[in-house]
Amino acid sequence: MRNGRRLVTSFVAAQKLASLRNTLWNRQQLAFSSSVASSSTPPIQEESQPLSIRFEYGLPLLDVPLPSRNEPCQFTMRPLSDTVGSLCNFLRLEDKGIDYVAVYGTNGVKLATCTSIEHLLQFGTFRLRLNDKFFNVTVPKTGTTPYDSDKLRQLDDLRATVASLHAALCVDEYKLSREKKLLLQLENAETLLAPLHEAKRKIEQECEAHTDRVMWAGFAAMGVQTGLFARLTWWEYSWDIMEPVTYFATYSTVCATFGYYLYTKQSFEYPSARERVYTKQFYRRAQKQNFDIERYNRLVNEVEDLRNQLKRMRDPLFQHLPVSYLSNLETEK
């Protein structure tokens, strides 16, 4: 009997010890899970400092008190290009003492860094966290309207319409004034070019006559040489005597043509030789008569350019182009 009582007593004690161990284990697990949850979840404070966004020169500005020196710093936000992530990066760069920065909605949900500032401003109110401090940021309703993308698109369409209307009203007036200006410049250039044309025509006539005389003189020299060889061959001497003479005369002509090539870097051809004689005579007579060849070429190029501009202005393809494009024709060559 005593042994049976001892067994029952030891069994009951073992059950109590096991239940006590389970209770302690559950309490430790609960404490560990609560500590992990408290460390992973940022504490949400109920007390928040109010901040307000203001608009200057069409851009939203936010004054944030930085935690390191507790002094306000102004941040400019661009609604269409900046995001929540860029705002957080600006805050970290400005104050190295900021370890944690985030933006929350009014319901306590953290906003993604890819959220645009335009969308953030449409919330009206949001929360900004810097380390352990929270700020309630309010957005005035009067400043959010200009930053809507649809409104901006409508403004761009309105600008394009106004520009096309202005071009339609002003293009004819611009073309008339521009054409009148070009005609006046063309008239002045042609007036200056007229006496130079006359002087050039006289010099050309003299050079043509001189070139013809040189060419006929060469032909006469060849005829005299042929007649002289014929006289010496059939009347004065025999062919046996004149054959070496004609050979050396022909070879001398070949040497002369090769010397012409070495001097002029051109092959000896009658048209090129005539052009060379004409050009040398023209420059010689122009210098003698004080004819400014560079000024003449400059005026000729100017007249040609003005005529091309007038042709483009009167081209049907350029009739309905905007004034900004037509004005570029003044600088194009």
Image: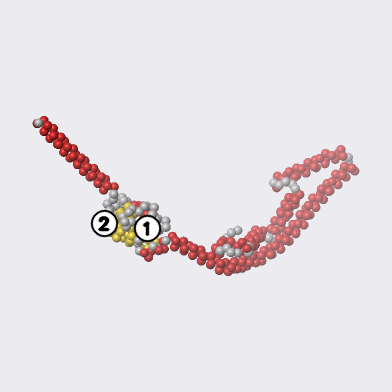
Asked whether, in this view, residue 87 is left or right of residue 161, the answer is left
Q: Amino acid at mark 2?
A: Glu
Residue at 65% over, 60% down: 304
| Residue for badge 1 | 120
Q: Quadrant of the C terminus?
A: bottom right
| Residue for badge 2 | 46
Q: Position of residue 35 (x, y in %)?
A: 25, 46
Badge 2 density bin: few <14, some 14–19, many ≥20, Cα 10 Å: few
Q: Nearer the viewer, residue 278 or 25?
A: 25
Q: Nearer the viewer, residue 235 or 18?
A: 18
Residue positioned most to the front: 1
Vertical order, 175 against 5 (above or below): below
Q: Is residue 331 visible?
A: yes
Q: Quadrant of the N terminus?
A: top left
Element type at mark 2: loop
Q: Amino acid at mark 1?
A: Leu
Mark 2 or mark 1: which comes first in sequence?
2
Q: Position of residue 260 (x, y in %)?
A: 73, 46
Instruction: Please tell me in which quadrant of the rendered image residue 30 appears.
Output: top left
Instruction: Please tell me in which quadrant of the rendered image residue 9 appears.
Output: top left
The figure's colour scheme reads secondary structure
